[in-house]
């Protein structure tokens, strides 16, 4: 499966543990999704080689994650196929979810779409004729209304005919014919309603059969954690011997329990508790540890059993050095030749090495709306960096290569405003501006990280969260530029260590807002 040694160890360990929980910790850039794909194909291969007794519905895999994006990424890559020693393997994937929430690349694997396709194939038709009943019933109702109008007209004429017996006889014959026609139309309407009802029952039976066939042919069922609680799965009596949960450290504990109700024997949790936890808005709930993930709970009791994916393929070694030491006890190693793989043309310029901390000395944090804060000096410094980069390297296309991130929403707005003022509104299509939380799971060639905090003696607020710090420092592939106030950041143990590390490595530049 073209996996490295730590990935292979994690896969084998998870496969050998037939019952209970397995934990795989995937730090940034360590090939977490690739490991999950190889694990899925390995488990399916294991089932394939098992006896026919084991090849029941229980042999199917349920793959979940808290977000649609994570589920869709796995479903998409399974659909495209996983390369093995025997060639490309493409498991049969079923995606449970609402079409509006599912990525376009896997909409054809949504359960409802697969059921419709199976029903069409079984009936030999291109589409269900359900819509024709409505048109037929509308026509019959209109016919009955027209006949009733004609009858009313005849009754009026009979009243007006007086003593003209010949005319009266003609009108009575006409009325009799219309009355018979009305009776036939009403009978036909009643029969049509019954036919529609019978058709609906037949269609429901066909739908159930099609759904059963779709699940019978499925190798992997993909759903969000909440989606795995769908009543339909319970009603069908589906069971999943093995459940894999991606982004397990980003899910609240009770959500991770939902997919375990299908007679599950083995659950494999994949995530990184050193990155951002689930978002919980209630301070009371947070106080009672509601934001704790199942991964974090098990980590405390199974620390020696966690399999760490310890080789990263994203960051230049100068970028990964500090996060590895600070968050992963120096166990996170660089992949082969990462200094060459992540080298960039701008590294030749002394101002733009792979990693540098810019100490914005005289910037000040200010309180914006919603108690969020911003720092104009850091926003201007970010503009100056990009401006200089584009000026020094006019032939390099930086579109979609730069991300500017910050922990604070108000600073995102400030950054956008300053960049638009300098480069025009189109800059928002070229550079990705986001909060650190919003950027988790993404990467860019260049990341500019604006810390914002510069309020002497005030502390650094939720910037001090080491998990948020870890996410912010591990998004860059080629260059990471951190903008912050060294004096303020030194009030935090972790950020103080970063400043000290930058000084020790001679990777700190003092910047005056006036110079910017």
Image: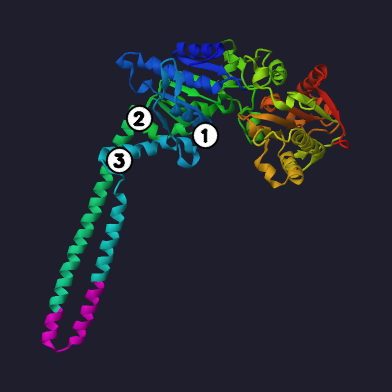
Residue 329 is situated, as x and y percent measured from the top left of the image, at 68, 13
Placement of 187 over or under 247, stated as above or below: below
Query: In the structure shown, which secondary structural element does the residue marked by tag 1 occupy?
Result: helix
In front of the other: 370 or 287: 370
Circle 2: is it few (<14), some (14-19), or many (20+) Cα within 10 Å? many
Looking at this view, is 115 or 357 the one in front?
357
Helix, strand or loop at disc 2? helix
Image location of residue 462, percent across then percent down:
73, 31
Residue positioned 31% across, 35% down in the render: 210
Instruction: Identify the mark nearer the N-term, 1 or 2.
Output: 1
Numbered disc in front, either 3 or 2: 3
Q: Is residue 167 magenta?
A: yes
Judging depth in this view, the residue of 13 and 450 nearest the camera is 450
Q: In the image, 20: left or right of 314?
A: left
The quadrant of the picture occupied by the C terminus is: top right
Q: Quadrant of residue 364?
A: top right
Magenta: predominant secondary structure element?
helix
Choose the circle earlier in sequence order: 3 or 2: 3
Residue 68 numbered tag: 1
Which structural element holds mark 3? helix
Colouring scheme applied when the structure was drawn: rainbow
Q: In the picture shown, does residue 217 fall above or below 282?
A: above
- Residue 495: horizontal and vertical position, in percent? 77, 23
Rendering coords of residue 323 (x, y %): 70, 19
- Gap in angstroms between the C-alphas marked 3 and 2: 17 Å
Q: Mark 3 or mark 1, which has the lower sequence index?
A: 1
Q: Which residue is mark 3?
A: 120
| Residue carrying label 2 | 215
- The answer to which quarter of the image holds residue 120 is top left
Task: Measure how far apart labels 1 and 2 are at the Cα level.
Answer: 21 Å
Q: Which segment is the magenta one?
A: 148-171
């Amino acid at each position: 499966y073209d996996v490295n040694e730590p990935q292979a160890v994690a896969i084998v360990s998870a496969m050998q543990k037939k019952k209970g929980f397995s934990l795989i910790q995937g730090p940034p850039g360590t090939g977490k999704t690739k490991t999950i794909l190889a694990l899925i194909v390995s488990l399916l291969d294991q089932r394939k080689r098992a006896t026919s007794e084991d090849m029941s519905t229980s042999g199917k895999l349920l793959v979940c994650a808290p977000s649609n994006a994570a589920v869709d990424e796995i479903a998409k890559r399974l659909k495209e196929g996983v390369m093995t020693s025997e060639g490309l393997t493409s498991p049969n994937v079923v995606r449970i979810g609402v079409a509006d929430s599912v990525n376009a690349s896997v909409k054809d694997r949504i359960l409802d779409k697969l059921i419709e396709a199976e029903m069409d194939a079984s009936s030999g038709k291109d589409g269900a004729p359900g819509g024709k009943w409505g048109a037929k019933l509308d026509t019959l109702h209109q016919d009955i209304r027209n006949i009733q109008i004609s009858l009313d007209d005849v009754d009026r004429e009979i009243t007006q005919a007086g003593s003209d017996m010949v005319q009266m006889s003609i009108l009575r014959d006409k009325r009799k014919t219309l009355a018979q026609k009305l009776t036939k139309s009403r009978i036909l309407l009643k029969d049509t309603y019954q036919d529609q009802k019978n058709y609906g029952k037949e269609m429901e039976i066909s739908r159930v059969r099609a759904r059963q066939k779709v699940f019978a042919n499925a190798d992997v069922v993909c759903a969000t954690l909440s989606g795995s609680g769908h009543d339909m799965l319970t009603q069908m009596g589906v069971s999943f011997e093995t459940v894999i949960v991606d982004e397990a450290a980003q899910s609240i504990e009770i959500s991770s329990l939902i997919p375990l109700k299908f007679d599950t024997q083995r659950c494999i949790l994949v995530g990184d508790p050193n990155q951002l936890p689930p978002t919980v808005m209630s301070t009371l709930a947070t106080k009672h540890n509601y934001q704790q993930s199942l991964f974090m709970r098990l980590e405390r009791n199974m620390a020696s059993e966690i399999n760490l994916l310890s080789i990263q393929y994203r960051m230049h070694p100068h970028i990964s050095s500090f996060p590895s030491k600070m968050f992963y006890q120096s166990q996170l190693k660089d992949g082969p030749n990462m200094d060459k793989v992540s080298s960039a043309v701008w590294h030749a310029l002394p101002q733009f090495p792979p990693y540098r901390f810019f100490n914005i000395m005289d910037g000040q944090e200010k309180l914006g709306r919603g108690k969020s804060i911003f720092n104009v000096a850091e926003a201007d410094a970010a503009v100056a960096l990009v401006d200089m980069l584009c000026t020094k390297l006019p032939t390099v296309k930086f579109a979609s290569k730069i991300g500017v991130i910050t922990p604070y929403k108000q600073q995102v707005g400030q950054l956008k405003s300053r960049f638009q003022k300098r480069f025009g509104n189109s800059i928002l299509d070229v550079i990705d501006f986001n909060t650190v939380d919003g950027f988790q799971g993404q990467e860019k060639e260049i990341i500019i990280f604006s810390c914002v905090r510069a309020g002497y003696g005030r502390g650094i607020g939720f910037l001090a969260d080491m998990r948020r710090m870890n996410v912010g420092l591990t998004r860059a592939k080629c260059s990471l530029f951190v903008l912050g106030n060294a004096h303020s950041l030194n009030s935090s143990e972790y950020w103080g260590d970063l400043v000290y590390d930058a000084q020790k490595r001679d990777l700190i530049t003092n910047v005056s807002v006036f110079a910017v």
